[in-house]
Image (tube, rainbow, N blue to C red):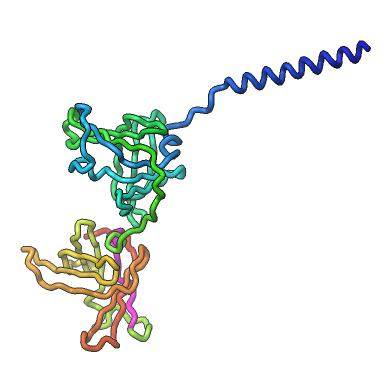
């Protein structure tokens, strides 16, 4: 009988211990999210802007509009940003300081090269609002705009680079050529040699080409059609006078190969040469 009573008392204390432990667990605070976890927890849409006076500013304001869009900050440290019509804007890497005061983005081009790095001051960062501050004039910190974002259910579009962005993402070197029969042709071939060299297509629409010995070759402006099928060069002299305009058919345009086709005789499209370029780390002379 005594043993039974002792056993019953032991069970009672054990039960009370479990109850007390459970109660204590319920009162424990939930793990606090880091600023990075909060930013990555939802997708964001620009929904407002205020100036230093606390006045609302239209999203069409010239200083605000470059910041407007949908933003997707992934937990793996990458991000994509689109305009409100789903057009790709920038993509790359992001981070937030441990104190939640600064967000950094490193925008990257199609080849993964860095375009720029930008820091902004975070004013509000919760699951309901993400607001950062920009300064139209970095030398005048008394004038600023707070860009306000709120959560969105807008589905992330596919981020695709334009043909022009791909061409400008790396520097190029002529590395081979093939004829219409698919046979490799020496770069010294008379039909090919004038197209051999290093090419640097800038994001501002200008270009420079040099020979493989770094001697100057061409400079001017360039463009690629929206469908990526043609590239146009406008060669300029030192006085910015047009020397000639040349349009070539693009057969391959990726971050690892740029190939265009030339015709020795434009009246005979059965004979052609494909001029193959691959990325180079050769420094622009």
- Furthest residue toward right: 1
Q: Nearer the viewer, residue 102 or 243?
A: 102
x, y percentage for residue 260? 29, 74
Question: Is residue 128 inside the magenta stretch?
Answer: no
x, y percentage for residue 53? 19, 27
Q: Nearer the viewer, residue 281 or 61?
A: 61
User: Which residues are the magenta region?
Assistant: 167-179
Quarter containing the C terminus: bottom left
- Furthest residue toward top: 2
Residue at 84% across, 15% down: 8
Query: Left or right: where does residue 272 sit relative to residue 143?
Result: right
| Label tally | 0
Q: Nearer the viewer, residue 25 or 96?
A: 25
Against 199, is 27 above or below?
A: above
* Picture quadrant of residue 142: top left
Q: What secondary structure do most residues of the magenta stretch adopt?
A: strand
Residue at 21% across, 66% down: 209
Against 132, is 92 above or below?
A: below
* Picture quadrant of residue 11: top right
Residue at 37% across, 65% down: 256
Quarter containing the N terminus: top right
* Picture quadrant of residue 67: top left
Question: Is residue 172 inside the magenta stretch?
Answer: yes
Residue at 88% across, 12% down: 5
x, y percentage for residue 243? 10, 71
Query: Left or right: where does residue 235 sit relative to residue 18?
Result: left
């Amino acid at each position: 009988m005594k043993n039974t009573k002792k056993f019953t008392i032991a069970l009672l204390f054990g039960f009370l211990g479990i109850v007390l432990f459970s109660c204590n667990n319920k009162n424990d605070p939930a793990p606090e999210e880091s600023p990075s976890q909060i930013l990555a927890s939802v997708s964001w849409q620009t929904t407002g802007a205020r100036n230093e006076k606390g006045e609302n500013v239209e999203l069409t304001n010239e200083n605000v509009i470059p910041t407007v869009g949908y933003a997707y900050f992934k937990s793996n440290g990458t991000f994509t940003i689109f305009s409100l019509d789903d057009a790709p804007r920038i993509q790359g890497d992001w981070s937030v300081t441990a104190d939640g005061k600064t967000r950094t983005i490193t925008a990257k081009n199609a080849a993964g090269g860095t375009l720029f790095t930008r820091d902004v001051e975070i004013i509000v960062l919760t699951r309901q609002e993400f607001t950062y501050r920009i300064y139209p004039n970095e030398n005048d910190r008394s004038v600023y705009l707070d860009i306000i974002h709120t959560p969105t259910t807008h589905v992330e579009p596919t981020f695709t680079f334009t043909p022009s962005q791909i061409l400008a993402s790396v520097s190029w070197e002529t590395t081979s050529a093939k004829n219409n029969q698919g046979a490799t042709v020496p770069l010294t071939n008379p039909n090919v040699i004038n197209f051999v060299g290093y090419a640097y297509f800038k994001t501002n629409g200008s270009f420079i080409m040099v020979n493989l010995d770094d001697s100057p070759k061409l400079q001017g402006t360039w463009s690629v059609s929206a469908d990526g099928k043609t590239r146009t060069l406008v060669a300029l002299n030192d006085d910015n006078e047009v020397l000639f305009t040349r349009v070539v058919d693009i057969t391959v345009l990726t971050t690892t190969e740029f190939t265009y086709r030339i015709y020795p005789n434009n009246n005979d499209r059965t004979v052609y040469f494909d001029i193959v370029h691959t990325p180079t780390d050769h420094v622009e002379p």
